Amino acid sequence: MADQRARRISEFIEPLRVRPGRSVNLRDFDPRRHSKAVRKKKQGRELLQTGIAMLADYQARLAAQDTYGVLLCLQALDAGGKDGTIRHVMSGVNPQGVHVAGFKVPSVEELDHDYLWRYAARLPARGDIGIFNRSHYEEVLVVRVHPELLDRQKLPPESRKKIWHRRYREINDWEHYLVDNGFRVVKVFLNLSYEEQRQRFLRRIDVPERNWKFSAADVMERRRWNDYQDAFSEMLSHTSTSWAPWYVVPADRKWMGRICTAAILVHTLIELDPQFPTVSDEARARLADARTELMAQAPDAGGHRNHRVPAGARHGAAV
Ligand code: ATP
Ligand code: MG
């Protein structure tokens, strides 16, 4: 049963994976892509609930085992649905085990360091799921589309030569290092169409409760749509690796984007297969002793304690 579920998840996400080494054009990926497994929203809702429950279970084991960590990098164009995806997909998970880091325009302090510094500082710990809401990939996306941002990074002249290919290699190497050290890197690109972005922007303008989500800069970035499509295509072609592949998720229908993201995350955890730590015979014997002691302290039928509370354990008593 569990194996069957794992196989179905694996088959469901397989077509979304960018094959390592393959040169791709983002325009070839359909943002409204259908899946045979989920045709209707209702079916999708059930599947998402299953995914959320599985995530909660796996996350508890990941935390208890405290050996592996998982980093989910979420990239999208504006209004791609990153926030909603995080909110829904992680809704069943213990908040203590999840850390979300959002990355905006870098600060002066961040610009004074190498470009990966600020991302390294927000990596998840072992046992945690870390989510990057935008990620180190901005360094080969927005910075590529706006070369003036590169000027602000104060690089020495020799570091600007063949910069994009060098960055792809450095990012691949960095992710390899993380994977080698027990941190799985999961990369999801929420793929939105030009028309769907237009409609979402219009909703942000027309619905007062959504106004705060809209920024005039979003419309300016939209004018660079083709440049972004090119930058994403290059990035996907060079940084989908066997150790950290990219998944291009159809995001025009929000529920579909969320199901796919949940499935990709669950798939990673199934592969890791974290286990609750097993207890040694000695520790088990200590548990039995503690149990005996606690049972002996149970109140009698009249609700009176069987034992006097030891002085050191009394409320407020100094030990
Ligand atoms: P929302 O979807 O709610 O708008 P957001 O992730 O777009 O969320 P914003 O505050 O609107 O958040 O935008 C963050 C901005 O920071 C984006 O325009 C992004 O391109 C920019 N940014 C992120 N990383 C970098 C970077 N390394 N260099 C320059 N700009 C960056
Ligand atoms: Mg924005």
Image (cartoon, rainbow, N blue to C red):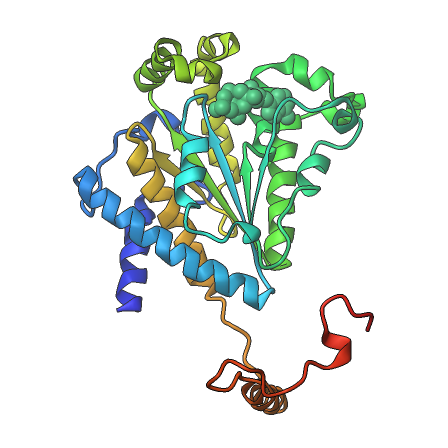
Residue 305 in the image: x percent, y percent?
A: 58, 83
Looking at the image, the residue that sits furthest to the front is 302
Q: Residue at x 35, y 39 (%)?
A: 258
Q: Residue at x 39, y 48 (%)?
A: 264
Q: Quadrant of residue 166?
A: top right
As drawn, 134 above or below 305? above
Q: Residue at x 33, y 48 (%)?
A: 13
Q: Nearer the viewer, residue 161 or 51?
A: 51
Q: Residue at x 32, y 61 (%)?
A: 6
Please state if 49 lies on the left or on the right of 294 as rendered.
Answer: left
Q: Nearer the viewer, residue 301 or 272?
A: 301
Please state if 152 lies on the left or on the right of 28 as rendered.
Answer: right
Q: Quadrant of residue 174?
A: top right
Q: Tell me the quadrant of the picture where the N terminus can be found.
A: bottom left
Residue 140 in the image: x percent, y percent?
A: 58, 27
Residue 141 in the image: x percent, y percent?
A: 55, 24
The total of numbered circles placed on residues is 0
Would you say residue 17 is visible in this rendering? no
Would you say residue 75 is visible in this rendering? yes
Q: Nearer the viewer, residue 194 or 215?
A: 215
Q: Quadrant of residue 259?
A: top left
Q: Quadrant of ligand 1?
A: top right
Q: Tell me the quadrant of the picture where the C terminus can be found.
A: bottom right
As drawn, 284 above or below 246? below
As drawn, 240 above or below 93? above
Residue 124 in the image: x percent, y percent?
A: 62, 49
